[in-house]
Amino acid sequence: MVQAIAMKQTQAEQIVVLVPFATEHLEGALQLSQEMSWPYRLEDWAIALELGQGFVLCDRAGQVIATAAWWAYGEDHASCGMIIVSKAAQGRGYGARLMDALLAAAHPRTITLNSTAEGLALYERRGFVRIGVIQQHQGVPHERHQAPPASLVRAMAPSDVEAVAHLDLKASGWARRQMLDRLIQAGNGHVLVRDGEPRGYAISRPFGRGHVIGPVVAESAADARALIEAALARLGQVFVRVDTSATSQLGDWLESIGLCQVSDATTMVKGPHIPPAGPARMFALANQSFN
């Protein structure tokens, strides 16, 4: 009897198939994120798939029961995320199956991700190491913000995009011009100008429950704050999310204006990790999957 039950379980697991993430899986992926109370919209999933690739696991009825996605930043780097296994399918090794497929596809790139507490062991078994903590701040600002002087921060123009891509490369170490172009198209950008040259930038766009401000790249916490204030001035009092490093020196200020910390994630990397050259640094992420 025990052997018969084991055979049935093995047969059931074999019915679960791993296939490339495609447009027809978006609705199923959205349902998975809703089950986990992750605030993705269908549009957020669609942009993620447009910019990246990944895998899903489907049961014999064609239902999406797990997802994993990754984004290539040139030939040397990638980020991964949107790794979800439905609650009913957890504990069967599906997360490991997805990650192994993803790592094989992204090889030999250095891969960065932000992990929940539940995922740490899975990633550490595959050689990921912890390098930092990301804090998720969100809420509706207590009051409307004044924009910084236009001589310091102004709206991003098409002629700024090349400089913005260069700043992003210096701050992250990643070549991700295609992603930046798409994020700018989806939202609004600001640049911080000093001595006539862009020295920092921020992009805000619709995401999740409202808007996300990120990426934010700047040379100091004060400059990053000015860029975020410019974005907030344009958005007004709407729901806003900012994902920032625990060492960014922005956390207390974000709390003071009504963007409370609601969770954190552990930043992990697999492969050589070389700190970005700077002097610009990443103060807020595009989201925890894109980084």
Image (cartoon, helix red, strand yellow):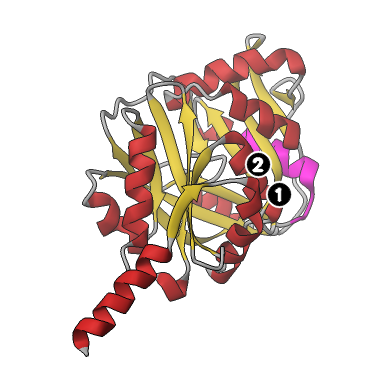
Q: x, y percentage for residue 223? A: 57, 30
Of all residues, the one furthest to the top in this rendering is 196
80 is within the stretch colored magenta: no
Q: Residue at x 32, y 68 (%)?
A: 92
Which of the 4 quarters of the picture holds residue 117?
A: bottom left
Rendered residue at 36%/61% (across/down): 94
Q: Residues within 10 Å of mark 2 (few under 14, many from 20)?
A: some
For the stretch drawn in magenta, what is the main secondary structure?
Answer: helix
> Residue 237: which quarter of the image?
bottom right
Identify residue type, mark 1.
Glu
The answer to whether one can see residue 106 in this image is yes
Disc 2 element:
helix
Residue situated in front as seen by the camera: 46 or 24: 24
The image quadrant where one finds the N terminus is: bottom left
Apparent side of residue 43 relative to residue 170 in the rendered image (left or right): right
- Residue 91 seen in render: no
Measure the C-alpha gap from mark 1 to mark 2.
6 Å
Find the residue positioned furthest to the bottom.
Answer: 1
Above or below: residue 26 compared with residue 205? below
Query: What's the magenta region?
Result: 226-238
| Residue that label 2 marks | 47
Is 227 in the magenta? yes
Residue type at numbered disc 2: Ile
**Left or right: residue 68 compared with residue 231:** left
For image coordinates 54% across by 19% down, the residue present is 167
Q: Secondary structure at mark 1?
A: helix
Check contact, mark 1 vs mark 2: CB within 8 A.
yes
Residue 15 point in image, percent of width and height = 42, 65
- Rendered location of residue 247, percent (x, y): 39, 43
The residue tagged 1 is 43
Q: Nearer the viewer, residue 17 or 187?
A: 17
- The image quadrant that residue 4 belongs to is bottom left
